[in-house]
Amino acid sequence: MALPARKTGMIDRDLALFPGWQLGSAPQRKRIERRDLLGAIARAERAPLGEPELDALTWLTQEWWDQGGSVDGRVRFTWYELGRDLYGRERAGWSPSGRHRQLMQDAIDNLHAVVITLTCVNVLTGESGPTLRSKVHILESVVDHDQLQLFRAGQADAASIGALRHDTVEIKLADWLVRQLLGGSLVLDWRTLRRLSGTAKRLWYYLGARSDEFGPGALPGEVALAIDLRPDLYASLNLRAARERDNRAALRAASQRINHTDPSYVKLTVVRNPGHEAYQLRVTRRRAGLVDTAVIEGTAVTT
């Protein structure tokens, strides 16, 4: 199976860490409230943020960058281009299936509708503080065509559907998001993103966003990070089993999937914290894979 030609995807670090993403098989909710990395309450309201939304946002942000990273946050694309990179095959005549098109369109709608609460920041001024909260949208606007609306309603004919390869959609990233992206963002390998799903993908984003916290490893050329396994961490990864050991098992399985998929990781293991009843996730990466080893105009890159 050939994978699309896109090389990288981009996302804001705060959004990569945001605990409101709901990846995995658990039923999704339109309103979710969880503690973030700093222990403050973060929320997502009015629409769910699942795997299609995370993938689409990562694609849109990279497309914004590829189109020049304009300060107005505008991105022009076609459903065909988005579908090709999210679900497609590099072969003549391929086009997104009806199911794929519905996933993409719902994802864009949800990214436009959702309201998220970012903690410890005033997105209007950039001021930070433990008591600050900012309620924001991710996409400010979405503009498409009447024919696309007919298509979504199942009323477009075959010729009109073929024209969708060329009809453009335009979205505008929210101003706060553009400011943060211009200050530096997480860039991820697109092929690895495509090969991961569910909890493994959510953990992969989470670890990528925390790459600057890794310290020296046991061997030269390696860096390491130990993360205590607490209820808030499980919740931020959308692990919601009643028993802690079941959440731990799911995290162990996700870690093994990353071990087998991303060569920049040397080892991810779930172990008991010495001298404590609690467990830790211990992560070792190759130094060359750290996001702070390559920078493109303020944007950190991991491959």
Image (tube, helix red, strand yellow):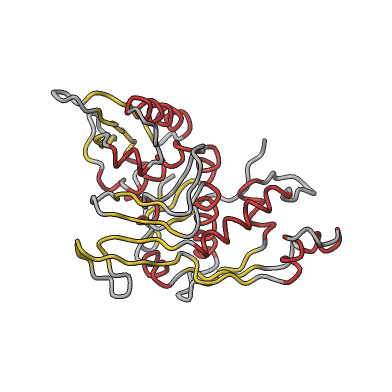
Q: Position of residue 300 (x, y in %)?
A: 37, 54
- The reply to whether residue 144 is in sight is yes
Q: Residue at x 66, y 39 (%)?
A: 2
Q: Residue at x 43, y 52 (%)?
A: 187
Q: Position of residue 6 (x, y in %)?
A: 58, 51
Q: Position of residue 215 (x, y in %)?
A: 22, 40
- Judged left or right of residue 17, residue 174 is right
Point out the residue furthest to the left here: 275
**Is 129 placed above or below 11 here?**
below
- The reply to whether residue 267 is in sight is no
- Judged left or right of residue 126, residue 93 is right
Q: In which quadrant of the rendered view does residue 166 lie?
A: bottom right
- Judged left or right of residue 188, residue 224 is left
Q: Position of residue 4 (x, y in %)?
A: 63, 46
Count of numbered circles in the view? 0
Q: In which quadrant of the rendered view does residue 162 lie?
A: bottom right
**Is 184 placed above or below 51 here?**
below
Quadrant in which the C terminus is drawn:
top left
Q: Residue at x 53, y 50 (%)?
A: 55
209 vs 2, nearest the viewer: 209
- Judged left or right of residue 283, residue 240 is right
**Is 97 placed above or below 120 here?**
above
Q: In which quadrant of the rendered view does residue 262 lie?
A: top left
Quadrant in which the N terminus is drawn:
top right
20 vs 178, nearest the viewer: 20
